[in-house]
Image: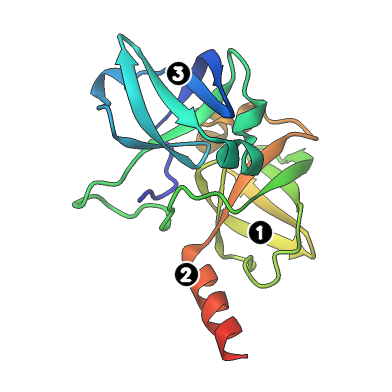
Amino acid sequence: MFTGIIETTAKVVKLDKDGTNLDVWFDCEVSDELKIDQSVAHNGVCLTVVDIKGSTYKVTAIEETLIKTNMNALGIGSDVNLERCLKANGRYDGHIVQGHVDTQAKVIGIDERDGSWNFMFELEENPTSLIVEKGSICINGVSLTVVSINGRKFSVSIIPYTYEHTNFRSLFVGDFVNIEYDILGKYIAAALNQRS
């Protein structure tokens, strides 16, 4: 389990296709603290560390992950947001994040606002009631608050610290991001659907 509070970014240093899977090697400042079989969120995608060599480590993204997330758009030098799983005695500084991406959204606008940034996104599907204004959403692994929503379009505001310490600084209009809806909202929606 994660909280959407990004610890650092990791850089792609090697990509290897293995059948329908993609093995990705990353370099980051916490590589020496990782352990094989550890779950780590990469742009909000929970992946298992399968190998470690020096300052680099490897994860494997299976076909389902490549279809559903922006892991398929990674190239050498790409930065991803990184979060190790929450310790049992840790603080919930963001919100409950599973690392299970629900869908992707396209960046349709970036508005710099003299000290913050407003990012606008359009979802591939209608989120029904899974996104609410002032509710939590996870974008590329970052726990954020929804500012506004209009159909499939919604926006969030980014403070300078988040902008500088995540890969939001390298997003452009037209890029795709991973979206994980708030787990509480998903459970409530599922319960209400069973009642009707």
- Badge 3 element: strand
The residue that mark 3 highlights is: 26
Q: How far across and how far down the image is residue 69, in percent?
A: 62, 40
Query: In what quadrant of the picture does the C terminus appear?
Result: bottom right
Q: Which mark is residue 147?
A: 1
Left or right of residue 92: residue 102:
right
Distance, label 3 to label 1, CA atoms, is 33 Å
Nearer to us in this view, 115 or 57: 57
Residue 158 found in image quarter: top right
Mark nearest the camera among 1 and 2 is 2
74 lies above or below 2: above
Q: How far across and how far down the image is residue 30, in percent?
A: 32, 22
Q: Three-letter amino acid code at disc 1?
A: Val
Left or right of residue 123: residue 16:
left
Q: Three-letter amino acid code at disc 2?
A: Leu
**How packed is label 3: few (under 14 Cα within 10 Å), some, or many (20 or more)?**
many
N-terminal-most mark, 1 or 2? 1
- Badge 1 element: strand
**How packed is label 1: few (under 14 Cα within 10 Å), some, or many (20 or more)?**
some
| Residue extending furthest toward the bottom | 196
Q: Three-letter amino acid code at disc 3?
A: Phe
The residue that mark 2 highlights is: 184
The reply to whether discs 3 and 1 touch (Cβ–Cβ < 8 Å) is no
Q: How far across and how far down the image is residue 57, in percent?
A: 37, 19
N-terminal-most mark, 3 or 1? 3
